[in-house]
Image: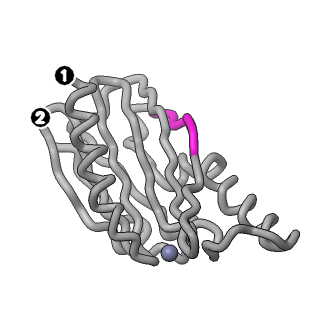
Amino acid sequence: MFKVLLFSIMAMAAREHGAHTHGNATMSVAFDGKNGKIEFHAPAQGIYGFEYAAKSAKDKANKEAGLKKLNDKINDMVVFDAESKCEIKLDLYEVDQKDAHADVNAEYNVTCARPPAGTSVTFNIQKVFSRIKTVKVDVLIGDVQKSQEIKKSGEVVELK
Ligand SMILES: [Zn+2]
């Protein structure tokens, strides 16, 4: 059941992602008990500032620095309730280069000491990636399925 629901929410996010609007990003968060998955999609412009294939040493360094934050900053970007004791780990990421544009996709595994259903999660994505203005968050946890637009760091989504 979890896999089926997860697939549907990810597919939904992927469709919306097709719009590729600079300044926008999408994140889906799905939980089954104590274990969860997060998918994050953003135009590369929001992650490292450009979308052409990196050629110069400066471009390559900027790209690498932006992508590194996907791993290093995820636990600052998505903060679960302290009591749930959740840890988010990067599973994989990819840069999907398409002519003049590029997308960045990242997937994470989440493991918590207690199921986070009924608590809340705080999103600080704009603090880490300042070029991203709006993040559409889709949440699937227990019986709860909701979407919320995050316009600034510190916004909270109730997991109930
Ligand atoms: Zn673009």
Q: Which residue is mark 1?
A: 1
Residue that lies at the very extreme toward the right in this rendered image: 57
Residue type at mark 2 is Asp
Locate residue 17, reporting x and y percent. Answer: 35, 61
Q: Main secondary structure of the magenta part?
A: strand
Position of the N terminus by quadrant? top left
Badge 1 density bin: few <14, some 14–19, many ≥20, Cα 10 Å: few
102 and 62: which one is in front? 102
93 and 155: which one is in front? 93
Q: CA separation, marks 2 and 1?
A: 12 Å
Q: Is residue 137 above or below residue 80?
A: below
Secondary element at tag 1 = loop
Give the quarter of the image for residue 119.
top left
**First in sequence: mark 2 vs mark 1:** 1
What are the residue bounds of the magenta stretch? 86-93
Locate residue 112, reporting x and y percent. Answer: 42, 27
On residue 143, which mark appears?
2
